[in-house]
Image: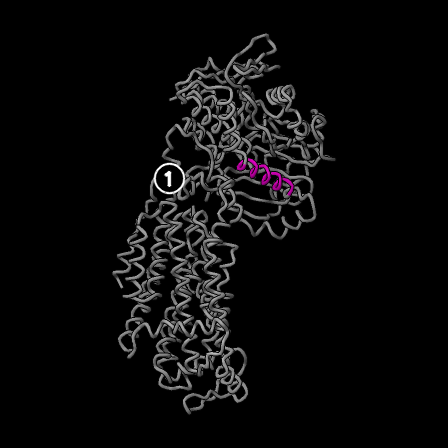
Amino acid sequence: MASSKLRAIIVGGGIAGLTLANALEKAGFDYVLLERLEEIAPRVGAFVGITVNGLRILDQLGCYEAIEDNNASIEMLYNRRWKDGSFVRGIDALIRDRKRFGYPFLVMDRHFLLQTLYDNIEDKSRIVPGKKVFKVEHSDEVVSVECNDGSTYTGDLVIGADGVHSIVRQEMWRHMDESGAGLLVSKERTLMSAEYKCMYGVSPATEGFSPGTFNSNVGRDMSFLWTVHKDGRVFWAVFQKLDKKYHMPNIPRFTEKDALALGEHCKSSYMTEKVKFRDLWENRMSHILIPLEEAFYKHWNWGRFACIGDVVHKWTPSTGQGANNAIESAAAAANALYRLARRKTPCSKRDVQEALSEIQKHREIRAKNHFTATGDLTRLEAMKTPMHRFMMTYIVPHLSDALGDQLSWANIGAEKLEYLPDPPKSLSGIMAFNQNYGPGGKSLLLRRMVFACPLLMLSYFTYAIFSSIISEAAVRSANRASTSSGKLNNDNHSWDAPIRIKPFIDSLTFFSPSLFNIYPVHRLQAITLLIDLAPLWFIWILESHREGNAMKLITVPIVFGLAFQRFGIGVVGPIWFFLHYISCPLSDYAGLDWRLVNVAAAKTALPAILATTTLPTLAMYFDPNFHRRLAINAVWQAFPLWTSVIHYILRKTAIADTTKHDRIYNVYADLPSIRFAIKVLAGISGLTFNWVRCTSHVPISRIFFPNWALIETLLRSAPASLDFVPAMSTFLQVDETVCFIGAFFWMALLFYDLKEAEMIGTSWYRLALCACLGTFVAGPGATVSLGWLWREEILAVKKAKGSVGTEYLVQSEISIGRHAGSL
């Protein structure tokens, strides 16, 4: 452990201070803690909520079992209106958070948490109560902390954990003033503000209140929180907007008379539809009324000073994250001091200052995120503005999953004590803690856009070629003739078009040479493209139903489907690949439930695609009746619409959707259906590819690859003097070639992410060899779909670089070789 003779002085015996004391004791770091009050764990009537980010650290310190054994876990969050108790929403975010990280959400008396932290300290002589600090002297060598009783404590650094009215923060500012740096903090002296007040209270067991839920009752300018302890006591809080926003030093203090007036004012407010606040107020055991200070300071350290917890980031209790962030800040401070103490050379003032600055570097962005989110939630629940009232009435009731995901995203990058082992419980969830993720994580959007930019160039390249093809005189003439006469003329034969509405008549004209088998190679090109399209279309549909892809552009496959029917898959496909890559980093699937595809969608996507894509394709190219071929093609033109409609009907009526259950208890429920569907579609693509190779009288390259000299001419927008059939043949060649160049490039980007995250160790040489061999043996459609399935299996069992613990345990086959071999 730490070997240095450095000594820290902790001022403040609250949650942050006692957590830091425990952490430094575990590190073997010399310290003393000075607490203003005579009692370490006073009973002041307040309660605290401890969530996964705080509990993991407490577990490392050895406090978790005592806390869990004495407090009931909270599983559901409910919003109601305090005017009538009517229901707004109920969400299972806390159940999901526990499943993701292994820890519950526990609500307890503040004094119980303080007492537990104090009891966990072995050398209690280092905890000194009744020491009110009034001055801190600072020099290049030491700091001296002076107390009202005349005692003085000397150390190498001082950590302020003494709350919103911190003397350590005041003394740090004083020394900054004296050193000429006062301008840096001039605005911070009045930064702290209060716009709301809060009355905390505890009442005995009351009929109508049961454990296991955390409740927020919302209304204009006032809101309530309440929950039930394991022993039946009801913890409650009342928030009310002040008459104006106050700033330090003018934030009001409240008397007992103020508290009684607020209680009487709230008595008629509903906690549930049958229970009013009166039932809690008239039987209260304790209460306290305080202002809700809010501040986020810019300067957390200077010289040998550092401040943590409420001293530098104070927010309202709406999200229950105040105590948890105090614990995280204490852990960050302990980590910084542990690293400092392990230096082999004596520590200078500069070394100490650099170490203390690490606390803010580690914590600032995450803490700022909590500060902003909590302030927003307080004002939302108090319906401060018309927009807040609109949101709470019409939007919030439909955002249950979003709130749970935000909670988890805020916690995934939580601090831990770097020098203590990860507790087994922290390794048991379906979302691994990872400090590379969460608020404050490095944004990679710009880099991903740069990496994926060639896909947009492919799309533009294809669009330019298609524009030139459509502009060819023979193509324009064929379009005009079919549109004006309603007949399709090919090879001295004429057939009535089953539909004359644009753009369907144009598409019928384009496909007619292949449908009538005028040029056999052209027919093979069309069959191969449309069969290979099915697995891609399947992937697009599944990605739109993935939990982690909610609210992204790729979740509307019907738009992209109709677009590629109009402009070509070679134009639209690379755009979809681009949007998928830039909007779907691996962090979006950090939780196994975020990887999960809607189970009903996964089970019904295959029959929907076979019915609307694969079978119509086979029918319109193998039906002996040419008129039926045209009729089938006319209906097939809108297959993205038909797929969406049939898929919707099937997943709503043909099968029970178990996703809400499975995302908590069976996050692999979608994989069997996905594996089977990919095998089927890849098998059909592979068989079709080899059938085309065996039946074609020209080399396979002639089927897939266009004449590059012709492409160069078309890109220059010069007339190529193409007849109608060769023009359509070139169109299909470019369409498939560019689409799958884009698909393979997209897969390369996805596997680059996996390799960068150390989730796969396969070399690029072997990956390229697999792609080439797969394409040669089974064709591009099968190869891309099997590559996508391989990635899916990796996402299901591997953890990204920086994650705690080992691979996820999954009772399923994960070898892509088995899946490919079964074909």
Q: Is residue 271 above or below residue 705?
A: above
Which image quadrant: the N terminus? top left
Which image quadrant: the C terminus? bottom left
The residue that label 1 is drawn on is: 428
The total of numbered circles placed on residues is 1
Nearer to the camera, 95 or 302:
302
- Confirm whether residue 112 shows in the render: no
Horizontal side of residue 538 vs 16, given as left or right: left
Horizontal side of residue 181 vs 98, given as left or right: right
Residue 302 lies, in percent from the top left, at 57, 24
**Residue stretch rendered in magenta on the structure:** 365-379
Residue 604, quarter of the rendered image: bottom left
Q: Amino acid at mark 1?
A: Ser
**Local crowd size for mark 1, using a 10 Å CA cut-off: few (<14), some (14–19), many (≥20):** some
Q: Is residue 460 above or below residue 525?
A: above
Horizontal side of residue 731 vs 42, given as left or right: left
Q: Which residue is farthest right?
A: 243
356 within the magenta span: no
Q: Is residue 25 above or below residue 717?
A: above
Residue at left offset 28%, top offset 71%: 690
Residue 656 lies, in percent from the top left, at 42, 59
